[in-house]
Image (cartoon, helix red, strand yellow):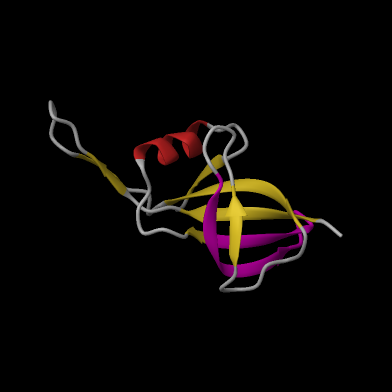
Amino acid sequence: MSIDLEANLKIPSLTIKSAHELPKRINNGSLRLIKRVTMDAIPKVGDTMQLSTRLGKPFDATVSRVDWDEGKSLFVVACTYARRSITVDEHNFLFTDPDWRVNQLP
């Protein structure tokens, strides 16, 4: 049985280095990326779930919290990008993918 969930993804910040410019730091600490996904079961805290973008390769995220959202009538799965760093391409794929939306934290 499949179940619809909302992935609430935290990604690491990154520094873009260029030979012609000073390094540029992109701080992602105050935002989350959100996407509706379908999974076989509700993941548990500590589980790894595989997420994807339309253009990039699938990537892993570690589940940090699972809550039922009464207003949305679905489970919201808070997760963190599994690797310590994210590449510029992976970052761009997430931000340009229409399936993912950015949620700015207060």
106 relative to 46 in the view: left or right: left
Magenta part of the protein: which range? 58-79
Q: Is residue 84 magenta?
A: no
35 relative to 16 in the view: left or right: right
Using the rendered view, name the quadrant where residue 64 is placed.
Answer: bottom right
The residue lying furthest to the right in this view is 1
Q: Quick one: quadrant of the N terminus?
A: bottom right
Q: Is residue 27 above or below residue 61?
A: above
Q: Residue at x 60, y 54 (%)?
A: 50
Q: Residue at x 70, y 49 (%)?
A: 37
Q: Is residue 104 above or below residue 17?
A: below
Number of marks in picture? 0
Q: Residue at x 33, y 50 (%)?
A: 13
91 relative to 63 in the view: left or right: left
- Give how far across and how far down residue 22 sits, in percent: 13, 34
The residue lying furthest to the top in this view is 20
- Give how far across and how far down residue 57 sits, in percent: 53, 41
Q: Nearer the viewer, residue 54 or 105?
A: 54
The residue lying furthest to the front in this view is 57
Q: Residue at x 42, y 40 (%)?
A: 91
Q: Is residue 64 magenta?
A: yes
5 relative to 33 in the view: left or right: right
The majority secondary structure of the magenta stretch comes to strand
Q: Is residue 85 above or below residue 77?
A: above
Q: Nearer the viewer, residue 30 or 9?
A: 9
